[in-house]
Image (cartoon, helix red, strand yellow):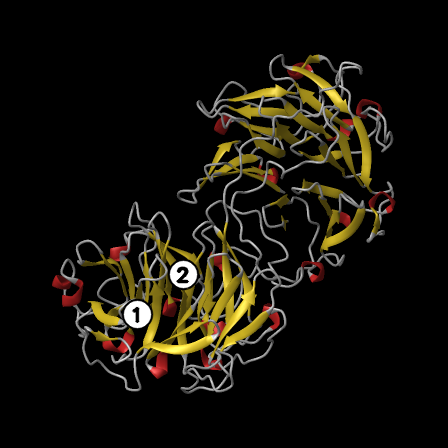
Amino acid sequence: MLTAYILHTGNVYISDYNNHRIRKVLEATSDITTIAGTGSSSYSGDGGLAINADIYYPQGINLDVSDNVYFGDGYNVRKITVSTGVISIVAGTGSLSGGYNGDNIQATAALLNGAGDVVLDTDGNIYIADRYNHRIRKVEISTGIITTIVGTGSASSTGDGSYATSATVNNPNYSRFDTSGNYYITEAEGNRVRKVISLVTTQQPSYAPSMIPSSQPTNITNPPSSLPTYVSGSYIISTVAGSGGVDMSGGGFSGDDGQATSALLKYPFDVKVDNASRYMYIADCDNARIRQINLQTGIISTVVGGGSQGFGGDGQAATSVETMLNHPYALSLDSESNIYIADGQNHRIRVVKNGVIYTIAGSSNSGYNGDEIQATSATLNAPSDLIVDSSGSEYLYIADYSNNRVRKVNLTSGVIITVAGDGGTTFSSDEDGVDATSTSIWGPRGLTLDDVGNIYIAEREHSRIRKVNITTGLISTIAGGASRGFSGDGDLAVSATLNLPCNVAVDSSYNVYFSDAENHRIRKIVSSTGIITTIAGTGSNGFSGDGDYATSASLYFPSGMYLNASSNDLYIADVANHRIRLLSYQGSMPTRQPTASPTVAPTSSPSNRAIISTVAGTGESGYSGDNSDSTSAAISNPHGIAVDSVGNVYFADSGNYRVRKITVSTGIISTYVGTGISGSYSGDGDVATSAAVNWPCGLFLDSAGINT
């Protein structure tokens, strides 16, 4: 059993229960170390270094405002002081056996009987799930005095509507505050979720609990039914469009006006999202269509193309049967959501405005016939990518693939010029650090701009990523070398080998992301260090991994990408899997609980009193009650619990192999995740209620939903 806490820096702290250690994963390196415990299941070491101490089946773990670590150590609660690494006891006597010897004494003189969850508020007060004493206890940090705030010590579940100290709780194991100071408890043996209402206020919380991570995707279609406890800075992968065909001959066309995850795509080469994050657009290449997904509903439709490969339709409705595209490889959107299309085998750039399609660059012939002419008179040769500049209206950049150039169209005057590439295919060491128009760029497959206008190019045939400085016009290589292949992760990107990169994106910190297509990976270059890493893909082609870490997933010739500037979520056109997939960037957790204490009472009541009630469960272990009042429902061995921004309660109904939800406005309980089938695993990428989960324990809420 593992309990993990993700620090605001992105480091992860783990109570490694059966290994009798506290461990730490550094976000910067992903290295794991032991910070407490020798591996021996005993108790020793107070006053010395935590790494030399023995600890005993550690459970709940938390951090205070100074990042000191607190954890349940068998029958004790201990603290690791971050500045010194020294371990000390803050509750319990150091015994390896449990008991109860009273309250209103120093916490270090008190007996505990199975320290489960440990929660802190921002004042540093400690709340302990004293499991087999059937109490929630509080250690006042200013005095060190321990008191009971919930429970009498009796192993039962009684007392709803009375003061919490007069109520009974049965093996309380997990707990959480909401931001109004209400306190939720799961009773493992009582088969209930209980709520202790703060007497400071009785209203529902007005915003989310403090354990919500900072960044998650918004409104993705059919997100994975469950996610692992993640490491900050990692990516979780899921499918948002396309239902399969896991080979180079698969795919097809179906699904318009239905859910995007049930639709068929055929070699989707590019994906973009509009500025308002309302719609996703897909270059469905072999279906000769541009397709659109409403990100609020998940519904897919065709917005450009009649489905036949060829050329036709200029001046007509984009969805007319007469409108033909010929292998649309890429698309871009301007600030008004007009759609620009690299119509590859028609050797044209086409635009859709007000529902009408027409050509703005290229003509009926392929080739190169010069610059400083009207773009509609120029010849292009298999344009493979394009981007409208950040102003959204002034310039259009084109990856003119078989002309081995990057071209630029002034959208006001209509004139086209070359900004990178001389048309050649050879590369020598003296071709970096020179004017971009004087060097060879062999097969520019993808391109993007950063916020100052620098141009990044995925140079497919030379297996390099190049950058053009917009101020000087000079070009440089930022990733890739003299050969194709795979190497270099964890080292400088300029020393790495790539294998036919197809697309490139850049974030607000100038970190560069690219699809290393024949390596079946998405890789990242950190701007501050120049170090390259893989963030998605194992290197083996195929389809796997939805709902898991992206580095454990299989991709198959990834190509186009769209990077969400605010969240760093990354959409990928997974070409030969005939799917659009999402890399959900995982942010870090705050380090502490809210300041509100659940035990502060008005002056008219005895001190340290609060009102307790049952919000789910009858006390009988079983399963019943979905879509009815939650207090009449049977639940079984509830564990992890969380509350969303409007007060809806989610809990792990472990013995029923489900996650269930209580809607605050109605009190109705429903199944949110799981089928109730024990001992099985299924359903990643499917509707969560169709998935099988096996004894779910911990869960947390992010800004988009529930993760178990």
Identify the residue at image location x=18%, y=58%: 473
> In front: mark 2 or mark 1?
1
Q: Can residue 246 be seen in this view?
A: no
* Label drawn at residue 343: none
Find numbered disc 2 in the image and state the secondary structure of the residue it sits on: strand
Q: Position of residue 708 (x, y in %)?
A: 64, 49
Q: Where is residue 356 in the image (x, y as percent from the top left)?
A: 46, 76
Q: Earlier in the sequence, mark 2 or mark 1?
A: 1
Identify the residue at image location x=57%, y=25%: 122
Name which quarter of the figure residue 407 lies in. Answer: bottom left
Residue that carries the numbered disc 2 in the rendered image: 522
Residue that carries the numbered disc 1 in the rendered image: 398
Q: In this view, does 223 lie above or below 618?
A: below
**Quick one: which residue is furthest to the left in this view?**
430
704 or 472: nearer the viewer = 472
Q: Is residue 328 visible?
A: yes
Image check: 434 left or right of 527?
A: left
Quadrant into which the N terminus falls? top right
Q: Are marks 2 and 1 in contact (CB under 8 Å)?
A: no
Name which quarter of the figure residue 483 lies in. Answer: bottom left
Image check: 215 left or right of 657?
A: left
